Image (spheres, rainbow, N blue to C red):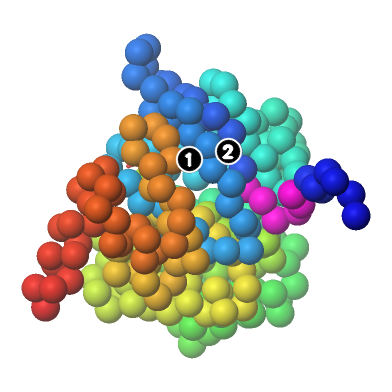
Amino acid sequence: MSPVSPPPPTDDVLGFTDVRIAFEEGRRVLDGLTARLSTKELTFVAGASGSGKSVLCRMAVGLLRPDTGSVELWGTRVDTLPERELVRLRRQAPYLVQGPALLDWRTLRENVRLADPHAPNEAVESALEQVGLLEWADRLPPEVGPGAKKRTAIARALVLGPRYLLLDEPTTGLDRRAAAQVEDVLASLKMRGLGGLVVTHDYRQLKTLADRVLVVAAGRCAYLGSPEGFLTSTEPSLKVLTAPFMEGATDG
Ligand SMILES: Nc1ncnc2c1ncn2[C@@H]1O[C@H](COP(=O)(O)OP(=O)(O)O)[C@@H](O)[C@H]1O
Ligand SMILES: [Mg+2]
């Protein structure tokens, strides 16, 4: 038996180490954030508006580079990776912006195909099937609801055959029914073992969908742990986030 423990495997790790970034002089959005996530898990990112959740997602795949600190994905230093290789990495870990960003004059199927013009038909059909949109595939985005638009955006990521998904507020602005459709998609991806980083303000999702919760506050990782631990925490910086939700949840 070796007295030295082996280094932890980095194969399934998204790691942020002492990451700092400022867009304006004197105001760091991230200010020494360190977190180590498993890309086999669904990690939900919580935090106040403007706390840096989107910045964190973008940094994970090199759409933003930290001023200092490092970002590592699957054993590769993302923050120093050349753009060419980042493009390849982002096919394995696509980042979905908050809006669906579809072409309105192309059908849902064509929108999915645009992600990868070389994708075989089966891959396109499979991506549409995974989000429950096969029957709607010939419609145009303006002919479908916001939930279907969002699911099309997810299918467009799935057609790349990703290892990880980064979803920025996938249910924000959706009505309850459309949000539930997107949540169903997340649940089925989770069941199939696809991990992801999901920014949300709807903490109802945490109980059923999250393996882990990461809270960004004051530029740092204020919490990284189980959803239950977050939701029941009495720590003031966490309670300020969960209290309105917990009240809302008991209101009926
Ligand atoms: N590209 C940018 N240029 C200037 N400021 C930015 C940029 N991206 C983010 N910010 C600022 O960083 C802060 C955190 O932004 P963001 O990560 O979008 O917050 P949120 O937690 O709501 O997703 C905000 O104050 C925002 O204005
Ligand atoms: Mg955001």
Q: Where residue 144 sits: x, y (%)?
A: 35, 75
CA gap, disc 2 and disc 1: 9 Å
Check the picture and name the quadrant holding the N terminus.
bottom right
Magenta-colored stretch includes residue 17: no
Q: Are marks 2 and 1 in contact (CB under 8 Å)?
A: yes
Q: Quadrant of residue 92?
A: bottom right
Is 73 situated left or right of 3 in this image? left
Residue tagged 2: 16
Q: Quadrant of residue 83?
A: top right
Q: Is residue 136 left or right of residue 123?
A: left
Q: Residue furthest right?
A: 1
Depicted 87 relative to depicted 242: above or below: above
Residue at point 52% right, 79% down? 188
Give the mark, 2 or 1, whose residue is nearer the N terminus. Answer: 2
SS label for mark 2: strand
Q: Quadrant of the C terminus?
A: bottom left
Image side of residue 94 versus residue 230, left or right? right
Decide if residue 175 is on the left or right side of residue 147.
left
* Residue at the farthest bottom position: 135
Instruction: Give the image location of residue 150, x and y in percent.
Output: 41, 66
Residue 209 horizontal/vertical position (percent): 44, 71
Q: Which class describes the residues within 10 Å of circle 2: few (<14), some (14-19), or many (20+)?
A: many
Q: Please determine whether, in this image, residue 24 is positioned above or below residue 247.
A: above
Q: Is residue 98 visible?
A: no
Q: Nearer the viewer, residue 149 or 108?
A: 149
The residue at label 1 has a CB less than 8 Å from ligand 1: yes
**What is the three-letter code of the residue carrying label 1?**
Leu
Q: Determine whether the residue tagged by mark 1 lies in a helix, strand or loop.
A: helix
| Kind of residue at badge 2 | Phe
Report the span colored magenta.
8-14
